[in-house]
Image (tube, rainbow, N blue to C red):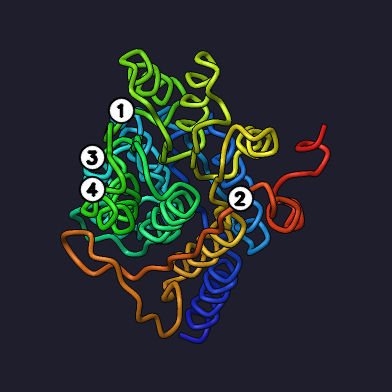
Amino acid sequence: MKHINVIFGFFLLIFLFSGCNTNPVIGLLMDTTERERWAKDRDLFVEKVNDLGGSVIVKVADSDASVQFQQALDLINEGIDVLVIIPVDKTVAAGIVKTAKKTRIPVLAYDRLIWDCDLDFYISTDNIQIGEKQANFITKAQPEGNYALIGGPTKDNNSIQLYLGWMNVLQPLIDKGDINIVSNTFVKEWVPEEGYEVTKKLLKDSIKLDAIIAANDALASGAIQALHEHELEGKVLVAGQDADINAIRNIVFGNQTITVYKPLESLAFNAAIASVKMAKGKNPTDNMSFTVNNGHRLVPAILLEGQVVNKQNIRMTVISEGFVAEQEVFE
């Protein structure tokens, strides 16, 4: 009996020692890395998880929801501890969450909310507020005239949130007759070609434009290209978001009015910390009271604040915080 107890104790020590040294494995599902900001998100997230003693398996769906679903199944079968999703499609991704939950894998939605599922955690920027910031700046600079709104794809919940923010500011001015919305379009993808086509059609129809509010900098850059072809760049106010290097340069040149800088480092670091905590069976944040409704439940969430970047504050914002290098902007 004594020998049995010794053997049992030996294996128990091995088990406990192994458990204490188990490094969390986080699966990161990404929509794309073609846009500049997403490569930064990936690198920052992986770096922070590594610093916390974990590792990350990254899979990129190239904006294909069915591919992302299969990638999720592959990660689940590999035995990851937590799944972090930047969803291609807010409803298709709900199926991923449901599948992960069957194997008791916690799921965190990164930047984009996933709808109608038992999501564990959500971290993003306050996208309604970002939409309000865009519209507030543009309407103060151009309180009257013809506005074109270029929204992102509706499969991304952020597109709807941004639009709500725009309309919170614009609707009173529309009701007064000060602002006329000449185009209100949601595109299929977050790419410059979509912004180009929307703006090109408006200009082809000889519609006078005073301002364009675009859901991201890629769409804004496409709109600027169409304006350039009609010698109107710099004459029409243009708002975007994400603080892409091309957008910052367009602002310096006077072709884009503003962008909105998202605190990507805080976003990625908070997501990494929450992921590692969940992998260890802990609550992602202590004493959390903020939640977001995803149509199924109130999801615990962190929403960070974006910051308007214009020609006057580039050095005080994105450059001083190391988001972009000064030599990249002022070549």
Whole-percent x, y for residue 290 in the image: 35, 76
In front: 330, or 155? 330
Q: Is residue 169 left or right of residue 281?
A: left
Going 47% across and 55% down the picture, which residue do you hit?
Answer: 140
**Which secondary structure lies at badge 4?**
helix
The residue under label 2 is 46
Q: What's the CA distance linking mark 3 and mark 1?
A: 16 Å
Q: Which quadrant holds the N terminus?
A: bottom left
The residue under label 1 is 188
Whole-percent x, y for residue 286 in the image: 45, 82
Neighbour tally class for label 2: few under 14, some 14-19, many 20 plus, Cα within 10 Å: many
User: Quadrant of residue 235 in the image?
Assistant: top right
* Mark closer to the chain start, 1 or 2: 2
Contact between labelled residues 1 and 3, with CB atoms less than 8 Å apart:
no
The residue under label 4 is 94
Going 28% across and 60% down the picture, which residue do you hit?
Answer: 119
Contact between labelled residues 4 and 3, with CB atoms less than 8 Å apart:
yes
> What amino acid is labelled 1 in the image?
Lys
Q: What's the CA distance linking mark 1 and mark 4?
A: 20 Å
Neighbour tally class for label 1: few under 14, some 14-19, many 20 plus, Cα within 10 Å: few
Q: What's the CA distance linking mark 3 and mark 4?
A: 5 Å
Q: What's the CA distance linking mark 1 and mark 2?
A: 29 Å
Neighbour tally class for label 4: few under 14, some 14-19, many 20 plus, Cα within 10 Å: many
**Of discs 3 and 2, which sits in the foreground?**
3
* Mark closer to the chain start, 1 or 4: 4
**Which secondary structure lies at badge 3?**
helix
> What amino acid is labelled 2 in the image?
Val
